[in-house]
Amino acid sequence: MSNPILSIRNSVKRYGPVHALDHVDLDVAEGEFLTLLGPSGSGKTTLLTAIAGFTDLTEGNVSLRGRDITKEPPEHRDFGMVFQGYALFPTMTVRQNVGFPLKVRKRPASEINERVDECLELVQMGAYADRMPSQLSGGQQQRIALARALSFKPQVLLLDEPLSALDKKLRADLQWELKALHDQLGVTFIYVTHDQDEALSMSDRIVILKDGKIQQAGVPDMLYNKPRTRFVADFLGKSNFLNVKIKGRQGDHIECVAGDEAFPVDATGHAGTVKDSAEIALRPERIRLAEPGKELLTGTVKQVSYLGERCQVLLTHSVLGQILVSCPTWKSGIDPTPGLQLSFGWDTDACVILEAE
Ligand code: ADP
Ligand code: MG
């Protein structure tokens, strides 16, 4: 990446025997919406707070536009932060909360007032300037926390699971708003979440963490469609995992065998050497169901679950075991009921050969 706004190099954070960060290298582009995604305990908060300056790294360094800031205290870095809890000052009004970072920076009162109004408009809370935090809902408090973090025009905004305490519907609305705000302001966002849908829907790029290490980084559709490992395929969306024998490469295909069934897998983008056996990830929505004989494989319906827009069908296959299929309810054309025999198949580019972890 040329001219990253932030570079984290070889960063390690140890807490006794625990490696909260284990040799993490990461560049963040100017204006990017970057998401750190991973299960609880994977090191997301540690990485974010190391960037903010609240966590001292055991090894490695952080630089801002090429300048080493590893030893700089948080107040010199000037990054905005929004946390999971609504960390508003309970005894201050909304206006005082949002203006606080500017007051600390000794800006004149008239400028503070003007900027507070601007920021409250940004988060659509202009009418609430005189309220106390306790008079606001969770979602409103989080908007104020966001306005406060933006008030001093930080060059980077760090957000640690800011929506995780909100209910599902409100969270979805605020995801749209945060993304729109990012696009409008052009500020670099580094966003922490353990929610894969949130990561997929908002990010320019996602970094997947596990045990303090980066598992894979990339744009959402690349990560979703070309996961490198089982962990990534499983964490980001649902996947079927098939154990297959590999017969070899034929042009742009790899011939895979499971029992007495053979099927080709698209080899484009698969740089790894072809081994004798492999694990393959196959997304449930990439599998087609049809009348017996119309597709490659035959299975028996074990269970069906209706989800409104989609229908999930669990099939059993004599060699592959259980296969989850997700089909849009409006066009399935067949009516899967337990016990029914169906054929199923997929396009060659639906399968991804995984690397061993
Ligand atoms: P996440 O935000 O992804 O849930 P964290 O960065 O909070 O993960 O934690 C990563 C690991 O570091 C965990 O194993 C956690 O228990 C450990 N850890 C984090 N902070 C501390 C601390 N202050 N003292 C000891 N261990 C910590
Ligand atoms: Mg955390």
Image (cartoon, grey):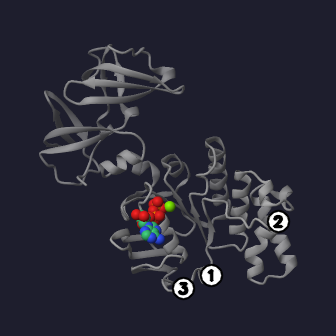
**Rendering coords of residue 325 (x, y %):** 37, 28
Q: Quadrant of the N terminus?
A: bottom left
Q: Residue at x 80, y 68 (%)?
A: 92
Crowding at dot 2, Cα within 10 Å, few <14 / some 14-19 / many 20+, comes out as some
Among the 4 quarters of the image, the one containing residue 155: bottom right
Q: Residue at x 60, y 59 (%)?
A: 84
**Rendering coords of residue 199 (x, y %):** 51, 52
Q: Secondary structure at mark 2?
A: loop
Mark 3 or mark 2, which has the lower sequence index?
A: 3
Labels 3 and 2 touching (C-beta < 8 A): no
Label 3 vs label 1: CA separation?
8 Å
Label 2 sits on what residue type?
Answer: Thr
**Rendering coords of residue 125 (x, y %):** 80, 56
Horizontal arrangement in the rendering, residue 76 relative to residue 263 (left or right): right
Label 1 sits on what residue type?
Answer: Glu
Ligand 2 within 8 angstroms of badge 2 C-beta: no
For label 3, the residue is 72
For label 2, the residue is 93
- In the displayed structure, 298 sits above or below 137; it is above
306 or 226: which is nearer to us? 306
Q: Secondary structure at mark 1?
A: helix
